[in-house]
């Protein structure tokens, strides 16, 4: 019995020495992800991680800006389709109503990505420079010109900039869409 105990004790010591040697070798390796002996990470590792995170953030920002531009182009396409349908029929069909809802969602998403929020019905917004349309024809004309202005302004921006004019234009587009949806 003592022979088997001594065998297991020797085996355990060999394994323990092997593990400690392996850990000591890895701790001296600069690629080892654990902190150095003084408790700090290797400065090179931290720099690599920071660079990688900055690159990923830049890629996300670029992708988000491209998606916003696609939404803007889609909003302009919907606006042109709505204007053409109104010129043909002089009324808003249920199909056009759905397009107005989709257009409003797109413009709200663009406004949110620009950092704008709901304009509300405050006194400051009541004195807008934009005149309120009195007819459906005037509303569709205003919708088309304001959406075009929004898209043109977005084309001038980069992923590093925010355009107050684009936010104001998006608010105006949303107001016109609400007018058209509830006027019908």
Image (spheres, rainbow, N blue to C red):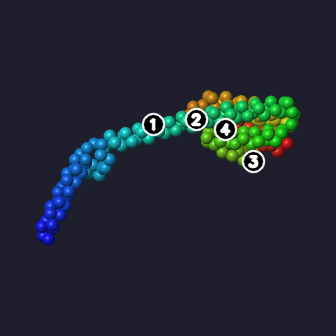
**Residue drawn at the location 44% of the way across and 41% of the way down:** 53
- Could you tell me if residue 179 is visible in this image? no
* Residue 83 position within the rendered picture, expressed as x and y whole percent measured from the top left: 79, 32
Q: Earlier in the sequence, mark 1 or mark 3?
A: 1
Split into 4 quadrants, where in the image is the C terminus?
Answer: top right
How dense is the environment of label 4, judged by Cα within 10 Å: few (below 14), some, or many (20 and up)? many
Residue under label 3: 121
Q: Vertical placement of 3 versus 146: above or below? A: below
Q: Which of marks 3 and 2 is nearer the N terminus?
A: 2
Where disc 2 sits, the SS reads helix
Residue under label 4: 167
Residue under label 1: 55
How dense is the environment of label 2, judged by Cα within 10 Å: few (below 14), some, or many (20 and up)? many
Q: Which of marks 4 and 3 is nearer the N terminus?
A: 3
Which is nearer the eye, 84 or 158? Answer: 84
Cα separation, mark 4 vs mark 1, equals 28 Å
Q: Earlier in the sequence, mark 1 or mark 2?
A: 1
């Amino acid at each position: 019995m003592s022979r088997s105990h001594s065998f297991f004790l020797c085996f355990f010591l060999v394994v323990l020495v092997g593990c400690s040697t392996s850990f000591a070798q890895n701790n001296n390796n600069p690629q080892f992800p654990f902190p150095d002996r003084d408790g700090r990470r290797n400065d090179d590792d931290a720099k690599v991680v920071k660079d990688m995170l900055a690159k990923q953030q830049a890629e996300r920002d670029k992708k988000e800006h491209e998606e916003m531009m696609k939404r803007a182009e889609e909003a302009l396409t919907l606006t042109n389709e709505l204007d053409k349908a109104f010129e043909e029929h002089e009324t808003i069909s249920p199909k056009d109503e759905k397009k107005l809802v989709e257009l409003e969602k797109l413009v709200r998403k663009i406004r949110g990505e620009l950092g704008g929020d709901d304009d509300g019905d405050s006194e400051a917004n009541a004195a807008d420079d934009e005149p309120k349309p009195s007819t459906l024809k005037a509303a569709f004309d205003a919708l088309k010109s304001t959406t075009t202005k929004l898209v043109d302004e977005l084309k001038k921006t980069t992923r590093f900039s925010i355009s107050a004019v684009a936010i104001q234009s998006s608010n105006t587009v949303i107001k016109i869409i609400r007018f058209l949806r509830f006027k019908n």
